[in-house]
Amino acid sequence: HTLNDNDNNDDEIIDLRDLMLDPESSLNAGGSGTEPYGDVLYKFWSDLNERFLSSDDGLPKINTVIRPVTAAQSGVEGQLNVVDAFDFMTTATPSSSLMKSAGIQSSGIVLSNLDTMAGEPKLNLFKVAGPRELTNSFQLGSKKPLTAETDLVVRIDSADTNSPLAFRNEVKIKVWMKNA
């Protein structure tokens, strides 16, 4: 059964305004404002916003969580190291004389500047436009560009050491974003 605004069985449908907003906001958005589903979701969201997204000094509090976590993992505040990110290798059939194996391998991925979030995040996860419609958006700025880098090895090994098909290429890839 597909729900639409013309359905008359509103008793069976959860009103997102009452589920995700405090009573006053729910009432202002057209909900009942009576907390028919309790207060857990909007209180959880309020607590999450206060602990991680609000700002005392112009920077979101989440940076104070990111720094020790990343330092414990990588030894560098704001940096996360993913070792052995992927290693894909295939081996040819024994009867093949052209190729012995082929593969793509990453020595790991390094994510940097994860702790440089600047300004208060503009987060609107609970924009409820109607009883059955929820829209989401998330915008976050950074003082330094968020970066991701990896070393890739692409290779084909041949049974014949003089084969023109055999090669090994190493590539360093680095991507950065000023705003995410």
Image (cartoon, helix red, strand yellow):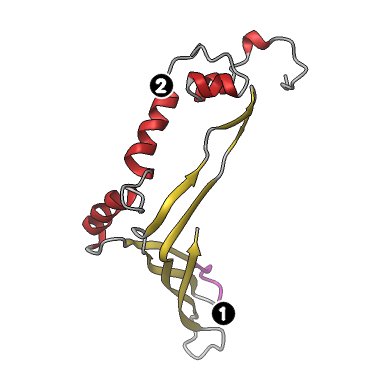
Residue 50 locus on image (x, y percent): 35, 37
Sequence-first tag of 2 and 1: 2
Task: Please report the bounds of the magenta region as a residue range.
Answer: 90-98
**Which amino acid is tagged 1?**
Leu
Give the foreground label among 2 and 1. Answer: 2
Residue 74 locus on image (x, y percent): 25, 61
**Foreground pick, 30 / 71:** 30
- From the viewer's perspective, is residue 150 above or below residue 180? below
User: Which residue is found at the position 28% from the left and 49% from the top?
Assistant: 65
Res. 98 mark: 1
**Which amino acid is tagged 2?**
Val
Magenta span: helix, strand or loop, mainly? loop
- From the viewer's perspective, is residue 1 above or below residue 150? above
Res. 40 mark: 2
Res. 37 mark: none
Which quarter of the picture shows residue 6? Answer: top right
Looking at the rendered structure, the secondary structure element under dot 1 is loop
Residue 62 lies in the magenta-colored region: no
Looking at the rendered structure, the secondary structure element under dot 2 is helix
Q: Are marks 2 and 1 in contact (CB under 8 Å)?
A: no
